[in-house]
Each structure stands twice: as structure tokens, then as C-alpha cells.
Amino acid sequence: MKSTRKKTAKKSNKKVAAKQAPALRLTQGGEQGRTTRNGALARLFLTHELTEFLYREAELLDERRYEEWLDLFTEDARYWLPLRRNMKSTELERENSSDLSGISWFDEGKETLTGRVRQIQTGVHWAEEPHSRVCHIVSNVQVLKATSAEVMVKSRILVYRNRLQDETDFFVGKREDLLRRVNHQWKIARRKIILDQNVLLSKNITIFF
């Protein structure tokens, strides 16, 4: 009798364990799912925050609030527009001038950007007096990499400029920004601008991207 009771108890325990196993797996999957959802939400909130940052920057430029725009850059910022070249399909990696080539439309730091702003503000700038009318459109914002202190963000830009009576320019391209959190605020530490044109069709580059 004792042997029969033991066998019955073992079978009962196995049945209970079998019923609990799917529930345990479901619970574990639920926790993993919540973790994934939390990560996706955090990325969504971060993308929205950075998108708003880039929108605000565009507004500052369009409203010619240059001093506030300069404040968005770190002291060691780099602002770089490489050249684009027409290359064979087998040499597309050489389409943009490299970081080490020393060839670019401009390769500036915050000090140089500040100097350009000061020149515009003198009122005697040969290409910006009277001021150009500029509109920046920013889209396709993507977070490529993110840490607690820095994020790499990619975006598309369309910049329209109208100067004097009938001078009109369009600049289309993309930007790769390294944004750094400084005193709980995002700052631009690196900006690489890629314009989708081989020859600069504008008379000059006196605007900011």
C-alpha cells in the first residue's frame, strides 16, 4: 500500500510540475517582453527629444538668433562639410573626401563659427547684407548609437535660401551629428554635412547647415 501511495504521489507531483512549467515560461517571456518594450519606449522618447532639439536649432537659424545657436555647440566642436566627387561604381568609398585628406568645403571649430557670426553681425558682410532669407527643413531623424553621455544622430536636410530679388539656392543632403550631454543639455560636438551635389551651385556658402 505504501509503495502504491508513493507512486501515486510522484505522478501527482509530475502533473503539477507540468502545469506550472508553461506558466513559468510565460512569466519569463513576459518579463523579457516588458524589457524589450521598455527599451523601445526609451529609444522612442530619446528620438523625440533629439528631434525636438534639431527642430529648435533650425528655428534659431531661420530666425537669425545666432548667439543662441552658437550656444548649442561644445567648446571642442567640429563642423565639417567634405567634398563629393563623381566616382566609378567600383570606387564609391572614395565619393566623399576623407577625414584625413584635408580637402573640404569647410572644416571649422566653434571659434571659426563664432567669427563667421560676428562678421555677419557687422552689417557690412558682402554676401549677407542685406540678410538672406533662409528656411531649414529637417527630417528622417535616426538614432544610430547612444550612451548615457553621447548619441550619434543622422538626419536629412533641405535648406532654402533667397537673397536680394531673385537669387535662390537649394541645398539638399544629410547630417551626422555627435550630440553630447553637458550640464543636462544636449550640445553638438561633431557635425558632418554631406550635400547631394558634386559642384557647388550657389555663389557662396554664408549660411549654416
Image (cartoon, rainbow, N blue to C red):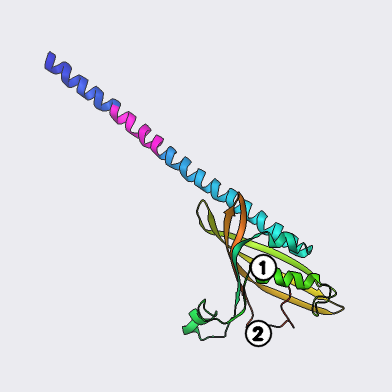
Seen at 62% across and 73% down, the residue is: 108
Q: Of marks 1 and 2, which one's residue comes earlier in the chain?
A: 1
92 over 4 or under it: above or below = below
Q: Quadrant of residue 25?
A: top left
Q: Position of residue 98 (x, y in %)?
A: 52, 78
* Gap in angstroms between the C-alphas marked 1 and 2: 18 Å
Quarter holding the C terminus?
bottom right
Q: Disc 2 marks which residue?
A: 199
Q: Disc 1 marks which residue?
A: 157
Q: Predominant secondary structure in magenta?
A: helix
Q: Position of residue 143 (x, y in %)?
A: 55, 58
Q: Quadrant of residue 130?
A: bottom right
| Number of residue marks | 2
* Residue, far right: 165
* Residue 108 lies in the magenta-colored region: no
Q: Position of residue 24 (x, y in %)?
A: 36, 33
Report the span colored magenta. 17-28
Counting other residues with Cα less than 10 Å from the Cα at mark 1, is it few (<14), some (14-19), or many (20 or more)? many
Q: Amino acid at mark 1?
A: Ile
Seen at 60% across and 65% down, the residue is: 77
188 over 22 or under it: above or below = below
Q: Quadrant of residue 186?
A: bottom right
Q: Position of residue 26 (x, y in %)?
A: 40, 36
Would you say 33 lies left or right of 5 here?
right
Residue 209 is at least partly visible in this image = no
44 over 173 or under it: above or below = above
